[in-house]
Image (spheres, helix red, strand yellow):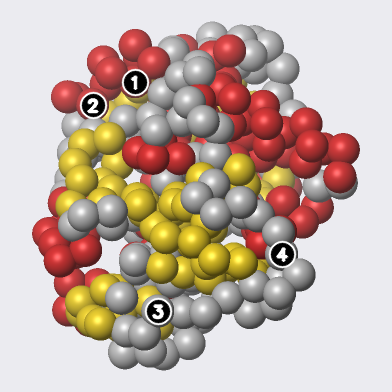
Amino acid sequence: MKAIQFTSLGLPTEVLKVVELPQPEPAEGEIRVKITKANIIPADIMFIQGMYGIQPELPQIGGFEGTGTVDACGAGVEMPLGAGVIFTGSGVWAEYVCIPAKTAIPKPPSMSDEIACQAFVNPFTAYGMLMEADLKAGDWLMLTAANSAFSKFVIQLAAKRGINVIGTVRSDEQKQALLDLGAKVIINEKTESIFKTVKTATDGAMVNAAFDAVGGPLGDKVLNSLNFGGKMFVYGALSLTPIPLNNGLLIFKNLTIKGFWLSTWITSLNREQRTAIFPEVLGMLAKQDLKADIQATYSLDEIHKAIAHMERPGRTGKILLDISK
C-alpha cells in the first residue's frame, strides 16, 4: 500500500516520503479501514517534529484523523464490510490503517467524506472547550488564531448559545468572513490594540474566558484582556514560545490558566455524556448546522504541496488528502 512515512524527526517537507508498505492485517479487536479522505491538522505537523504530547515510533506513518470504510475485521469483531467510519489514530496518511474497533465512529450516511475526515478533532475540541469554559449567554469569549478551522467551529457553537466572541487575526481580509459566521469583534493583532478594543467592545467588562492557540506575547495580551476571575484555556503553541506570565496579574485578578487536550477530555466523560455529545456534534455537521470550510485537496503523492499550502499565511479553509484516487 502507499503511505506517507518519516524515519527521522524534522520539518514535514524535509522528512516525509511516499513509500510502499505491506498492507496491515487487523489484530484481535481491530478493524482495517480503507481510507478515502484524511485531514491535515497542526497536531500532525508538531508530531512529525517530535513536539506533540505523544512521540512517534520511527519509522512512522503520519496523520491523525480520517474517514473510510471497513475493509476487514480481526478476531472478535463483527462489523459490516463497507461501512463508513470516522476515526483518529496515528498512521492515517495511508491507503489502509488498522484501528481498535471500539474507537471507530459510524459515519452518518448523509455526511460527505470531505466533512467526515475533519469531523472529530476540531469540532469535538470546540465543543469540549466550551463545555469546560461553562459560559452563559451574554458572556464574552476571546479566541486567538480566530481564522483557524477550530475557531470557526467555536464561533458557530458560541453564537448558537448567545456567547459573544472576540477573535484575533493577522490580516484585515480575514475579518468579514468571521463576523458573518457569528463573531462580534475581530481584531487585527498586528495593527490594533487588543486591550483597548476588548475594553471598548465589552463596555469595560473584559472577557470571561479565552482559548489560546498561540502563546508567546499574544498570549500575554490575551491574559490582560480577561476580567476578574477569568479563565484561559491553552490548546496550542503556534508561536513556539511560552506565555510570559505576570504573577501580579494572576494573583490580583484571580485568573486561571488551564491546558486542554481532546484525548484527556474524552476520557473524562462518562457513558451518558458520550452518548449525548457524539451524536449531537456529528448531527450538526451532517445537517450543516456546523459548517466546515475546505480550501484544497491533494493526493498522497502531493504531500509536500499539501503541507506547504496548509502552512501558508491567510489560508481560509482546510487542506485535505484524497486517498481514494
In-image side of 60 versus 12 (left or right):
right
Marks 3 and 1, the one that precedes in the sequence: 3
Q: Residue at x 38, y 89 (%)?
A: 59
Whether the residues at callouts 3 and 2 have beta carbons within 8 Å, the answer is no
In-image side of 289 versus 178 (left or right):
right
Question: Which residue does the numbered mark 3 point to in the structure image?
Answer: 23
Looking at the rendered structure, the kind of residue marked 1 is Leu
Q: Which mark is residue 77?
A: 4
Classify 5 as above or below 318.
Answer: below
Q: Which mark is residue 178?
A: 1
Give the CA distance from mark 3 to mark 4.
19 Å
Give the CA distance from mark 4 to mark 1.
44 Å
Looking at the rendered structure, the kind of residue marked 4 is Val
Question: Which residue does the numbered mark 2 point to in the structure image?
Answer: 174
| Helix, strand or loop at mark 3 | loop
In-image side of 317 versus 280 (left or right):
left
Q: Residue at x 15, y 66 (%)?
A: 301
Marks 4 and 2, the one that precedes in the sequence: 4
**Which quarter of the rendered picture does the C terminus lie within?**
bottom left
Which quadrant holds residue 307? bottom left
Looking at the rendered structure, the kind of residue marked 3 is Gln
Q: Position of residue 4 (x, y in %)?
A: 28, 73
In this rendering, the label closer to the viewer, 3 or 1: 3
Whether the residues at callouts 1 and 2 have beta carbons within 8 Å, the answer is yes
Whether the residues at callouts 3 and 4 have beta carbons within 8 Å, the answer is no
